Image (cartoon, rainbow, N blue to C red):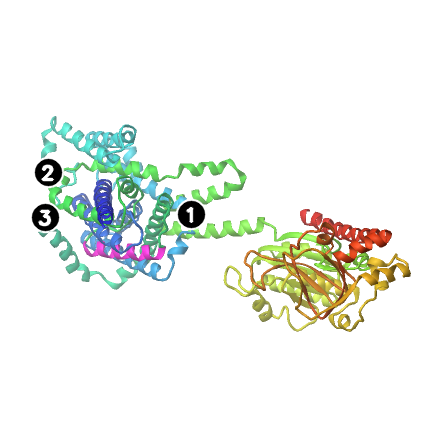
Amino acid sequence: MELAIKFKNDKLVGDFWGGLAAMLVALPSAIAFGVTIYAAIGPAYAGLGALAGILGATALGLVAPALGGTNRLITAPCAPAAAVLSAFAIELVQHGVAAPSIVLMLTALGLVSGLVQLLLGFMGIGSLIKYIPFPVVSGYLTGVGLIIIGSQIPKFLGVPGGTSWWRALISPELWQWQSAVIGAVTAGVMVCAPLLTRAIPAAILGLLAGVLAYFGLASMDESLLVIEGNKLIIGPLGGTASSMFEAITGRWQEIGELKLSQIGSLLGTAFTLAVLLSIDTLKTAVVLDALTRSRHDSNRELIAQGLGNVASACAGGMPGAGQMGATLVNLASGGQTRVSGVVEGVMSLVAFLALGAFIAWIPVGALAGILIIVGVRMIDRHSLHLLESPWTMMDFIVIVAVVAVAVGYSLIAASGVGIALAMFLFIREQLSSTVIRRKVDGGSRFSKRVRLRQDMELLEKQAGQTIILELQGGLFFGTKDQLYTALEPELGKRRYILLDMRRVQSVDVTAVHLLSQIRDSLIERDAFLIFSSLSHALPNGRNIAEFFDQMELTTMTEHVKVFPELDDAVEWVEDQILGQSPTQQSDVEALDLDDLELFSDHKEETLIDLEACLEKRSLAKDEKVYSFGDPGNELYVIRKGAVRITLPSSGGGESAGHHALTYGRGDFFGGMAFLSQMTRFNDATALEDTELYVLQREQFEKLKEEHKRLAFHLVEAVAKVLALRLRYSDKELMAMQE
């Protein structure tokens, strides 16, 4: 009991320090993100932006961890949200929308994006978002990073609001050197801080350095000590409980002013924002899983994130996602459970109420310096390695295209371009891979049905009648020509075309249409199209056997055959070539000793002596001849019927086992264990009513003493047949390796 309480207390202590450290990382960034968004409306709205960042950190921290399923995950305002919302605000300003309406539209955008996340979670889309191709995600993140850098350059240089980043760079007369100095100090300390200490987050040290630099400059310029009208700082927040309540209620009293058309215009941007936030969250959750050897619930997490963003919008805060930096700080500082995320939200609220007056003096240039470093770190520099190989060149082009569209046009358009290019990459990959895994002649692949020597010789002579193609991957419009190119040379010279479908992952209507044309061509020549291993559950859920029936590919004609396994198909073809059928086989008489190939070279008097040593044994269908582990003291010759040899599987059970061989009339089996005097390593079962000659070990020992020559000839005959079987097996293995 005491240990349990101590363990629980240790977790709570770890969660407190982890949450506190995470707040120290998340809050400065949240303030910077909020200022970035709202400063696009006008300098007077910078304070409201800082407030939105703080309220977002509070609401997200209180709601998302409490309802989510990922321990240690910290949810707070993030860079993708800042990039999308600031671009949205700038666009509205350019269209002449009034500032109060823009504030309301930003609030509504956050609300709708949260609702979209909820919908994605309830629909189970969370598991799919994780599979967005890396080049698209890389392009997104790099584009967001560049957008953030571009939006912060004017603030970094202290130029008037509304100035583009490139005009700010080429207009040094507009620069305020104090802002540039403060931003440079902040960025420099943030970059160098990890080299000196990891106990205090780099963003905190950078922010403190920026504030100290500002007041250092203020000691030489008293105008910087005035808060009203000072464009270098955030300005008053009104950090009280009453002001916070007024900010929340006042905004929702005016939300009714928005028109339905305005709400509808948000949907595209809201969807893009929701997807970006979801990707950011799930990417962080995946990294956290790897570090903690845990597993998150993607859909539950999306629902929690959606509710958190809805709560943030209702409180007047900005949306956010699971943050990588703050999460890793939480983990390193002792965070254990979801409580650490709640602690981060509580501490953000405490900081707002207690430090509102201090936050007002934070330099805008310092926040710009922090965000520029954040933006630089979001740029995927490792993707440059994709240029080193021609195989990855197209992936790099996709990244560049997504980045170009994101920076030059919009993130919404970039999402569409990214998805389209991802589909192109997939089709390209499918086209570059072969659907023909293996192509073997009928003389190089035999069934597990053991044949007599004369039958094997006939099958070898008629090998040209059969071709076997093992297919793989997807059979669709992109690989149709490849499949036809492989089959076309065989249509005019083969009577049996076997298609092994065991490794096929998908089939579309175009591929089925091609197979129907091949079938019709074979029917004209009285030839056969044979399928094996038609899956009843492809990865996409489609039942390929039902699909083929629906498309009338495998019905309406006797010239199309379907078998459960390739061996069954090969055995059927062999039977057709040999002129055999199950009906014919059941009507034949049992063989006498002199009819057996094994003893075809022996004299009649010798066979009489041998027959005296043999036992005649009858077995009913499904009756065991021997079982795994039985002593190998009997040699069996089949007079009539067939025997199936199976290798026991690890699963056990009566029906368990792998089909190894099938022996028929005139064959012998059990020779390896008999000659080596070892126990049986397989099971033998009668496939039908079967009659056997059985030579027991005692009779063989007696035969060796009384008829040494006969015993020698018997062993020699068994060895020859075993050697012949090994020859065909080697031939088949060589064909499979080609």
Residue 385 within the segment the image draws in magenta: no
| Whether residue 155 can be seen here | yes
What is the x, y in percent for residue 245?
12, 54
- Name the residue at 74% across, 54% down: 671
Q: First in sequence, mark 1 or 2: give its number.
A: 1
Residue 402, disc:
none
Is 438 left, or right, of 169 in this rendering?
right
Q: Quadrant of residue 183?
A: top left
Within-10-Å neighbours for mark 3: few <14, some 14–19, many 20+:
some
Q: Can you identify the residue that label 2 sits on? A: 227
Asked if the stretch drawn in magenta spans residue 311, the answer is yes
Q: Is mark 3 on a helix, strand or loop?
A: loop
The residue that disc 1 covers is 136
Residue 271: image location, x then y, percent: 34, 56
Badge 1 density bin: few <14, some 14–19, many ≥20, Cα 10 Å: many
Judged left or right of residue 310, residue 431 is right
| Disc 1/disc 2 C-alpha distance (Å) | 44 Å
Pick the front one: 516 or 639: 639
Residue extent of the magenta highlight = 298-315
Residue drawn where x is 14% and y is 27% of the image: 216
Q: Is residue 143 above or below residue 482?
A: above
Amino acid on which disc 2 is placed: Ile
- Nearest the viewer among 318 and 161 is 318
Residue at the spot 30% in from the left edge and 32% down from the top edge = 170
Residue position for label 3: 240
| Image point (50%, 63%), residue name | 541
Distance, label 2 to label 3, CA atoms, is 18 Å
